[in-house]
Every structure is written in C-alpha cells, then in structure tokens.
Image (cartoon, rainbow, N blue to C red):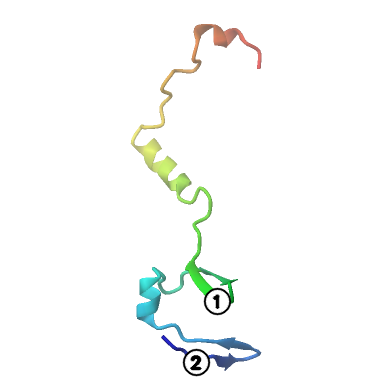
Amino acid sequence: MQVTIRAIGNSKGVVLPKPLLAQAGLSDDEAAEMTVEDGAIVLRKAARPVRAGWAEAAKALAAKGGDELVMGEFGNEVDAELAW
C-alpha cells in the first residue's frame, strides 16, 4: 500500500488507513512503538509494562479469599526460633 508523506509543521507524517491499523492490532488513542529496521520504518503495538495488571489481579484474588497463607506462618515448627 502506498501512502503520501505530508508536511506537518516542521515534521512529516502519513495517514494510516484504519484497516491497516486493525491488522496490526492497533486502535484509537493507543500507544505504539516506532523503530527503523533495515531501512524500514516499523510501527508496532507498544509492549505492556512489566507487571501490568498485577495489582488488579491481586485485589481480585484477595476479594475471593485466595490470598491466605498456604503453609501457615512458618514452613517448619523450629523456624519460629530463628532470629532474622
């Protein structure tokens, strides 16, 4: 697919057709990563931040009571005597 490079202020830009964005899994107001690889401009979905969604998942788990200790306070009875 050919696109026209247009002046946008001091920069240049292209209009990305909606079907092309949909094929790449990109939607409106979504962040994307742009790089140059072997002379080609590559636009990708932005990587999710590390641990994204963990806080919400932990809250949901706690709400269901799934955050209780599995082994009790200490793994071994004599562990309670250890000084940390």
For disc 1, the neighbor class at 10 Å (few under 14, some 14 to 19, many from 20) is few
Q: CA distance from mark 2 to mark 1?
A: 16 Å
Q: Looking at numbered disc 1 in the image, what kind of residue is underneath it? A: Ala
| Dot label at residue 79 | none
In the foreground, 11 or 40: 40
80 vs 55, left or right, is right
As helix, strand or loop, the secondary structure at mark 2 comes to loop
Q: Position of residue 39 (x, y in %)?
A: 59, 76
Q: Looking at numbered disc 2 in the image, what kind of residue is underneath it? A: Thr
In the foreground, 40 or 44: 40
As helix, strand or loop, the secondary structure at mark 1 comes to strand
Residue ID at (36%, 32%): 65
For disc 2, the neighbor class at 10 Å (few under 14, some 14 to 19, many from 20) is few
Residue ID at (44%, 18%): 72
Report the residue that reaches farthest toward the front: 38
Which residue carries the number 1 mark?
A: 40
Residue depth check, mark 2 versus mark 1: number of the one nearer the observer: 1
In the foreground, 14 or 77: 14
Q: Position of residue 49 (x, y in %)?
A: 53, 55
Q: Position of residue 63 (x, y in %)?
A: 36, 38
Query: Which comes sooner in the sequence, label 2 or label 1?
Result: 2
Q: In the displayed structure, would residue 31 be above or below residue 55?
A: below
On the image, which quarter does residue 5 sit in? Answer: bottom right
Quarter holding the N terminus is bottom left
Q: In the displayed structure, would residue 41 be above or below residue 78?
A: below
Residue ID at (66%, 13%): 83
Quarter holding the C terminus is top right
Which residue carries the number 2 mark?
A: 4
